[in-house]
Image: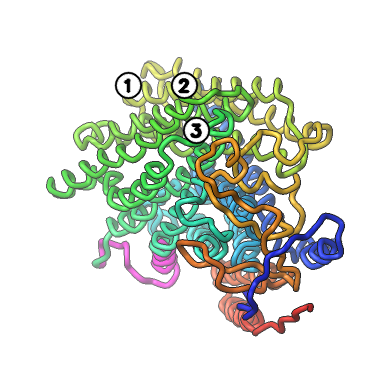
Amino acid sequence: MDGPVMRIPVRGRVMPGSPDAERLERTWRPRPGLFGWLASVDHKEIGLRYIVTAFVFLLAGGLEALVIRLQLARPNARIVSPEAYNQLFTMHGITMIFLYALPVLSGFSNYLWPLMLGTRDMAFPRLNALSYWFFLFAGLFLYAGFVVGQGPDAGWFNYVPVSGPVFNPGLNIDIYALGMVLLGLSTTVGAANFVVTLFRLRAPGMSINRVPILVWGTLVASVANLIVIPAVSLAFFLLWMDRNVGTHFFDTGTGGQALLWQHLFWVFGHPWVYVVVLPAMGIVSDALPTFCQRPLVGYSAVAMSTVATMLIGFEVWIHHMFATGMSPLVLAFFGAASLFIAVPSAITVFAWIATIWTGRPKFQVPFFYFAGFVFLFVVGGVSGVMTAAVSLDWQLNETYFIVAHLHYVLLGINVFPVIGGLYYWFPKFTGRRTNKRLGIITFWILFAGFNLAFFPMHILGLLGMPRRIYTYAEGMGWWALNMIVSAGAFLFAAGILLFLVDMAISLRRGQPAGENPWDAPTLEWSVPSPPPAYNFRVIPIVASRHPLWEDRLQDSPQRSELTDGFPLIHGREVLGTTAFDAIPNAILMMPGDSLLPLLLGLCATILFAALLWHGWLWAGMAAILCGVIIIGWLRPAKVAING
């Protein structure tokens, strides 16, 4: 935000095709050509970039998984070398957890938040663009080493001393450490942007108890990221220093603590599970009622359970460390907290089931994905509660049972809401419909492939198959189940490919969708599809949680004003409102397109590359250039007010 303009907002209308509408279009329209594409700060453009880039990384992580499953499909296989296998399963974990799961949800939130909240942009448009460029360059940084055989190879959890300088002296772990710090910058600035946007830019009347559940989920995840990302970034930076500067933070031989790594990593790692789950749950909570033709049952309970889930999530990280020799009192406390976290999750599940049960479900393509998600959520949650029992966790911790649980909670609970959300909001993104028949076929292939691939892993774990093994001998009793798992993985991959084909065909040949093809209740469906550059001709005034269903629900005599609001046509203006009651109190000027986010992302990447190769001079020059760009960024802009 460039700053407030002290002018009292005036209500009015902006008619389509009027001079005021044309002025809005000129003011907010991105510049044409390559410069406009690189310099764009449009939240919709950035959101779609996040989604597309995250899916590219999903495909890369999926290909790595298929190679892993070929290696494990039969005993004594030699598809890849042990060294290549270590890099494959490490990069697979890094890709799916860090480069796909959260970024794809950030894409949804970037695109949808201003539309759902009734505003024209995010609070910090240039910071929004910077978060994307940091994400893209961090992903390329991590994959650059993998391509030349120097990728991370100590698992995505990167435990010391295996990842320390003695046992892993190459560039592999340095690439991981510096790449994660760079990615942490992306996540941190993006999280701050979401928090400020919610508390500053909601439409008048959209009090905190009227925002969609997706907004609640992303808000809670963003607050968590602001707390935990510094912890894991510090851990990776300290590890890089141990490996390159001669410090001994994690070296037990010189007074360091190897267990310190696990604390710093898992105090981030467990809340991160909810960071990649709660926004996905928000997608389901907002979209499922549309197909049940009724509001979500227990909105307040679901919103509060979203907050409670994250709060308790901060207190259970040690259940990843039950086998490290901690005192029985610590184990008892964190075991109890791990069991208790099932309560708020169960509240949300019962709300979804009640919404379906008391509604009139319409079996459209997104509904199948959301209903399938509920099943996968329960399976993943039950296996998670099982490992909260300390004695059982000691038996299962290093087995494939945990691999099964992780894939249900980190892949299934993320991928199915995401694909369902893409089918749901595809008309909003593109203005076109998808193919219903092909979408339903794709769902059943994905659902069958997922459960075929990952449910047998529970049984493999109970049979004693350990995690992170390169191969196994005949006669262990694992061969048949591993072959089933591998077949399921390829079936799931075929479903993803079919989904991408459906998206491509629909993008080119899909039927026009209209503004609100699903008869949905929220604000994003009140504008054309795809939305104009300025989102809303006037900033709407909201009177309920379901502005487009008010006549149907008859919950209140008040009605939302969607056409008679605040025009704000004197430049790139948005309306600032109070944090809880959304009362207008300022007009805020937004910056236009800028190359500064791209340049800062490039210079920061050069800085980290120089640190990787110990090019101290280059690192110093890149740091100075970053400082110069930041100074230029912070220079007060001249605000021109038309009229």
The image quadrant where one finds the C terminus is bottom right
Badge 1 vs badge 3, beta-carbon distance below 8 Å = no
The magenta stretch spans which residues?
233-254
Q: In the image, residue 570 lies at what x, y percent?
A: 75, 73
Residue hosting label 1: 463
Q: Residue at x 42, y 69 (%)?
A: 241
Please, is residue 442 above or below residue 10 in the view?
above
Give the alpha-carbon distance from disc 1 to disc 2, as whole Å. Answer: 12 Å
Residue hosting label 3: 412
Chief secondary structure of the magenta portion: helix
Residue hosting label 2: 482
Instruction: Please give left or right for residue 325 compared with residue 164 in the image.
Output: left
Under circle 1, the secondary element is loop
325 or 191, nearer to the observer = 191
Tag in front: 3 or 2 = 3
Under circle 3, the secondary element is helix
